Image (spheres, rainbow, N blue to C red):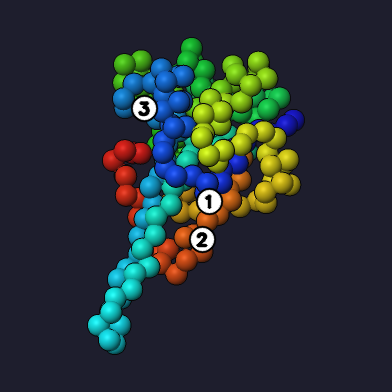
């Protein structure tokens, strides 16, 4: 079985949210639901020198994240009605709307906060990797829309062979929890000395 996943280049992302908005438009999502979200992660400190000059270690970077179509999906493990399925051909994880009872178990279980409750439909919803577009040999809408080409999608082993196996930068969860099908290219700020001061600056937007 192949396992499809996403590659994200942190050095290219400007936080423009084009991928996020393209997804919302394509999936006809309401104002309260994001299938792909952009974390604005920033931090840093000011330090006063002996000669009364000041230096700063301020930084900001952006992380674009959707469903990671994990090898061990926490959402699938807790669903009481088997409404969450992992495709046997490509490893993509999807919610069967005909089976979902809207209990919210998947919402609370996912360490990436990916599934969202649709208040109107009273069901959980999430990214399915644009399964319909893949069937037409097209890329997910978020990948196609990115103006900086910060996203790629395909066989995760091929992506790892090309880009490495890094699957976590703050504020993303520990990949050991679910084995996400995700590869990330880090950026200088992630390696910087001020990273420990970082925080999600747009928490209300991505919550």
Q: Mark 1 touching mark 2, by CB under 8 A?
A: yes
Q: Nearer the viewer, residue 32 or 23?
A: 23
Q: Position of residue 67 (x, y in %)?
A: 51, 34
Q: Position of residue 84 (x, y in %)?
A: 53, 25
Q: Secondary structure at mark 2?
A: helix
Q: Which residue is mark 2?
A: 188
Q: Secondary structure at mark 3?
A: loop
- Label 1: how many residues lie within 10 Å, few (<14), some (14-19) or many (20+)? some
Query: In which image quadrant can residue 28 be found?
Result: top left
| Residue at 45% in and 69% down | 193
Query: In which image quadrant can residue 59 be found?
Result: bottom left
Q: Which residue is mark 3?
A: 33
Q: Which residue is mark 1?
A: 11
> In the orientation shown, which residue stands out farthest toward the left?
52
Count of marks overlaid on the render: 3
- Label 2: how many residues lie within 10 Å, few (<14), some (14-19) or many (20+)? few
Q: Position of residue 104 (x, y in %)?
A: 39, 28
Q: Position of residue 88 (x, y in %)?
A: 69, 25
Sequence-wise first label, 1 or 2? 1
Q: Mark 3 touching mark 2, by CB under 8 A?
A: no
């Amino acid at each position: 079985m192949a396992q499809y996943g996403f590659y994200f280049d942190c050095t290219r992302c400007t936080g423009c949210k084009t991928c996020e908005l393209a997804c919302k438009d394509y999936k006809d999502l309401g104002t309260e639901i994001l299938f792909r979200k952009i974390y604005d992660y920033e931090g840093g400190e000011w330090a006063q020198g002996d000669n009364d000059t000041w230096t700063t270690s301020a930084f900001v970077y952006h992380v674009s994240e959707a469903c990671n179509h994990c090898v061990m999906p926490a959402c699938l493990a807790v669903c009481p009605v088997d409404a969450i399925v992992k495709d046997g051909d490509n490893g993509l994880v999807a919610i069967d709307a005909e089976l979902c009872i809207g209990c919210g178990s998947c919402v609370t279980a996912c360490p990436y906060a990916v599934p969202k409750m649709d208040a109107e439909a009273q069901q959980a919803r999430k990214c399915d990797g644009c399964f319909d577009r893949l069937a037409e040999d097209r890329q997910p809408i978020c990948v196609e829309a990115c103006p900086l080409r910060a996203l790629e999608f395909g066989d995760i082993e091929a992506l790892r062979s090309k880009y490495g196996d890094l699957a976590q930068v703050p504020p993303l969860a520990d990949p050991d929890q679910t084995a996400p099908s995700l590869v990330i290219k880090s950026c200088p700020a992630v390696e910087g000395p001020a990273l420990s001061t970082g925080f999600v600056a747009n928490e209300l937007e991505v919550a």
